[in-house]
Image: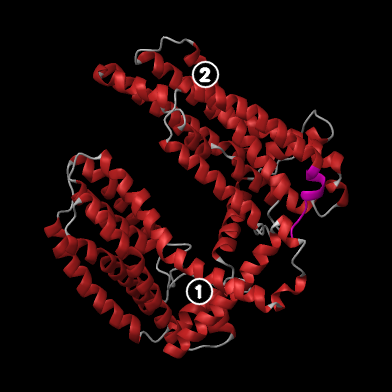
Amino acid sequence: MLHSFVLSFRLRNAYRVNSILYSLKQIPLVKKILLDRLYQSKALKILGNIISILLEIVNIFLGKILYLWLMIYAFLTLYPTNPANTFLHLIFFLTIAGALMNTYMFNPTKDKYYAMILMRMDARWYTVSNYLYSMLKTIIGFLPFTLLFGFLIGMPLWISILLPFFIAFTKSIVSCYNLAVYQNKKQVINENNPPKSYWIVVGICLLCAYGLPALHITITPLVFGILFLFFALCGIYAWVKIWYFPYYFSIYRFLLANHSIILSASEQKNKVTQETTHKYIQFDARFTSNKKGFAFFHDLFVKRHRKILTLAIKKQSIVILLLFLGALVLLLINKDIHGEINGLLLTYLPYFVFIMYLLNRGTTVTQAMFMNCDHSMLTYRIYRTPRVILGIFRERLKTLISLNLIPAFILGSALTILLYVTGGTDNLFNYLVLFVSIPAMSVFFSVHYLVMYYLLQPYNVQTEMKSSTYSLVQGLTYFVCYFMIDLHLPTFYFGIATCIFCILYSLISLFLVYHLAPKTFKLRL
């Protein structure tokens, strides 16, 4: 077993190192320095191995602390229940939901394909050794942070220690159940495409996790202790079954057979996205346009893809309206909270930067543009000429801004009305600034995502994302917007600053597109 694990680890590490070197070569300034023979360089491979080890350490710890912080600890102040009991309650139900969605064992990955299908490694020892390693990573990764958060909220030490083991036991139970499903029904459960019954259970778990504490119902340490003993016994039994299960090769042969050379998780996501978007495309000969040139070409695209482009916008608008009406009714009934809400509206405008980031459809729209238009059109030289690129860009920017402005205007109007209902403000310009700043944020994100798409076009002809720079800019955008959540500034000054920044950013970005897009907007290799 140890020999199988060492071989599989070396194989996975070699694949990761080559991926790191490839990503380094995609960085604009670095790719001119690094030659194609960089994969033969021992120094760069040593650097790749160091980065790979660091990524493995980050993978063990970073995801766990973000999960405990964002999904559990951040919600404790929202409930009137005991924080320690609420933390315990949330992690119990979220663990069950997470175990159903993330088993590791039933996740088809390239390293599994290379090891068991191409290299014919012993499937049982490969699976058991790597699954044991993944469970050890789970325990080691969670333990420091369950101790940390447990200390912060006054949770008993023994519970903080047992929680990582509870998570590992739960994952093992689900994996054992999936193995039993195959043994009895010959049905392989792919965790990237779980059955509907799993989604139902996940929905129930999420409802119990975040709904019951609002009703003053939580799991107590005594109840958790009893449940832990039950899950521990089931988990030990599951591990015995996992250890002696004889049909791993049959499972993986079936699990990996539906993929050409085996798609990675991101590639599988792209494939599902393509299949989903194709369902919403309307091929109707009646669709026509009175426009000419680039506007005609783009107008036909918008009409044929209007379901993809507008469906989420309609849903967002309806949800915002319902939330606004609910808040309005609540404020009319309970006038005691008017002062507090009024203060929030006059100081929490930065929070809505993150909200507008979540609402903006820039990523989805540009992905649809590439999958259903550009990935074919970019193979023609005429489509890559400056005049055509800039003409299409101008039409697309108009469409993207107009789509995103619909929920933005609704949200801006709702916030302005709520400000008036809760007591208003002495400075009448606050109404105007609050109303205008939300659409300004929407315009910023529309420009940002389309410009980023044209300057860093990240996809190849198979619609796989191949730009590490694009991913890096996406990540930085998320973290800057998330940082805004804790920023409390007067609405008047922040709103004016937002509008000015939006105008300057748009002008600079459009200037860059007009000068650089003809060189950067092309298919990646």
- Classify mark 2: residues with Cα within 10 Å, few (<14), some (14-19) or many (20+): many
- At a point 47% along the width and 42% down the height, the residue shown is 482
Residue extending farthest to the left is 222
- Mark 2 and mark 1 in contact (Cβ < 8 Å)? no
Q: Nearer the viewer, residue 148 or 356?
A: 148
Locate residue 421, reporting x and y percent.
36, 14
Q: Is residue 330 visible?
A: yes
Image quadrant of residue 262?
Answer: bottom right
Locate residue 202, reporting x and y percent.
34, 55
Magenta residue span: 516-524
- Classify mark 1: residues with Cα within 10 Å, few (<14), some (14-19) or many (20+): many
Tell me: residue 368, above or below residue 254: above
Per the image, the residue denoted by label 2 is: 433
Q: Nearer the viewer, residue 65 or 386?
A: 65
Image quadrant of residue 95?
Answer: bottom left
| 41 relative to 339 in the view: left or right | right
Mark 1 or 2, closer to the camera = 2
Amino acid under disc 2: Val
**Magenta-span inclusion, residue 232:** no
Q: Secondary structure at mark 2?
A: helix
Q: Earlier in the sequence, mark 1 or mark 2?
A: 1
Locate residue 173, reporting x and y percent.
30, 71
- 3D distance between C-alphas at marks 1 and 2: 55 Å
**Magenta-span inclusion, residue 522:** yes
Image quadrant of residue 225?
Answer: bottom left
Per the image, the residue denoted by label 1 is: 255
Amino acid under disc 1: Leu
